[in-house]
Image (cartoon, rainbow, N blue to C red):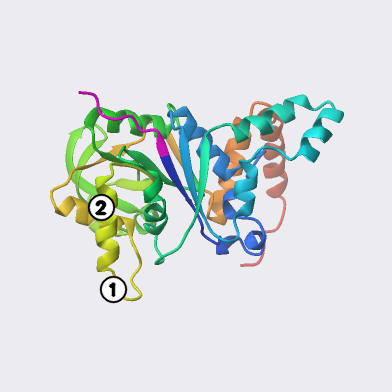
């Protein structure tokens, strides 16, 4: 009997983006532009490519711009684009509004990366779903969500998207999984260790960015929330470890042909813009030429004071 299709997704997008202040005082960090698209649109389009039809975005009180972006264009904007003959742009902004069925939930509850998912639980029904974040993503071929969904639907289990650590400081930035390797790049998880340091990491497989879960994880989330101590963060990683400790199965999958982008970090955000600009069909070639010239000129400039 085939396993249920993954058709729903939750995007956590309620954070304040304090690392980007003052820019994020009025603009949600998920709306920071990557060339001509906000970060969150890259994530949504990747979800659509994987067959997702319904998307719940968990927002905060300062995130109206996210909702507006995925809404139909205003009559004034539509009329302006028509009058200026910019019909391709009109088609594009209308396409964005029709990418999926969007629903919005305001985040409330304890601090922690598990709270947005529990806030959206009542909208998810009984089928498996994707949980991801609105400010980081993995570019891959095929798309990372498509790869995860294929593994999940084949096994009928939850799946964590993973990448291989390439630098020592990665072990202080991400969670790492350990367990039994079922096949190349696919692990049956027995441990999830958050920021373990290289010496204590159970493997070099870092859990980043996204998850496919069955509804059994929602039950464990509720139980974990009820066990929270005052001031304790509501951790998704701790919930997953508890889930595994009770004999439930979770898989970790290394996303193939992948590049991870963390646009919630200033330096990584700049790297994201540069790399995607180099791949952009319209501006990639001239931008490459500009970069080469800029780097050449920079060699003749004095370094800034430390």
User: In percent of the image, x 84 and y 25: which residue is there?
Assistant: 85
- Does residue 5 show up magenta in the picture? yes
In front: 104, or 20?
104
Mark toward the start of the polypeptide (2 vs 1): 2
* Disc 2: CA contacts within 10 A as few (<14), some (14-19) or many (>=20): few
Judged from the image, the secondary structure of the residue bearing numbered disc 1 is loop
* Label of residue 196 in the image: none
Q: Residue furthest top?
A: 1
Q: Which residue lies furthest to the right in this view?
A: 83
- Does residue 20 show up magenta in the picture? no
User: In percent of the image, x 80 and y 40: which residue is there?
Assistant: 76
In front: 205, or 68?
68
* Label of residue 219 in the image: 2
Residue 273, percent across and down? Answer: 61, 43
Quadrant location of residue 227?
Answer: bottom left
Q: What stretch is highlighted in magenta?
A: 1-8
Residue 50, percent across and down? Answer: 43, 29
User: Does 46 appear above or below 62?
Assistant: above
206 lies left or right of 304: left
Residue 157, percent across and down? Answer: 24, 37
73 lies left or right of 268: right
User: Does 265 appear above or below 100?
Assistant: below
Quadrant location of residue 161?
Answer: top left
Residue marked by disc 1: 229
User: Does 156 appear above or below 16?
Assistant: above
Quadrant location of residue 128?
Answer: top left
From the image, state whether disc 2 or disc 1 is nearer to you. Answer: 2
């Amino acid at each position: 009997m085939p396993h249920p299709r993954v058709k729903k997704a939750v995007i956590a997008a309620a954070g304040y983006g304090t690392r980007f202040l003052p820019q994020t005082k009025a603009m949600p960090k998920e709306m920071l532009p990557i060339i001509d698209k906000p970060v969150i649109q890259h994530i949504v389009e990747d979800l659509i490519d994987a067959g997702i039809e319904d998307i719940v975005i968990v927002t905060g009180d300062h995130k109206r711009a996210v909702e507006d972006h995925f809404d139909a264009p205003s009559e004034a904007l539509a009329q302006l684009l028509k009058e200026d003959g910019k019909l391709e742009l009109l088609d594009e902004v209308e396409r964005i509004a029709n990418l999926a069925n969007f629903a919005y939930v305001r985040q409330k509850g304890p601090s922690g990366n598990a709270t947005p998912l529990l806030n959206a639980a009542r909208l998810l029904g009984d089928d498996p779903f994707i949980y991801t974040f609105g400010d980081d993503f993995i570019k891959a071929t095929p798309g990372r969500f498509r790869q995860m969904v294929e593994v999940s639907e084949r096994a009928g289990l939850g799946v964590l998207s993973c990448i291989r650590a390439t630098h020592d400081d990665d072990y202080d930035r991400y969670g790492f999984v350990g367990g039994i390797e079922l096949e190349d790049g696919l692990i049956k998880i027995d441990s999830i260790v958050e920021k373990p340091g290289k010496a204590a990491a159970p493997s070099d497989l870092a859990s980043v960015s996204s998850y496919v879960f069955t509804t059994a994880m929602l039950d464990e989330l509720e139980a974990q929330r009820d066990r929270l101590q005052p001031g304790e963060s509501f951790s998704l990683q701790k919930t997953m470890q508890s889930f595994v400790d009770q004999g439930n199965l979770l898989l970790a999958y290394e996303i193939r042909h992948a590049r991870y982008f963390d646009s919630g970090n200033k330096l990584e955000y700049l790297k994201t813009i540069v790399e995607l600009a180099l791949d952009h069909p319209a501006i990639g070639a001239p931008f490459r030429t500009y970069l080469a010239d800029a780097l050449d000129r920079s060699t003749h400039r004095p370094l800034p004071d430390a």
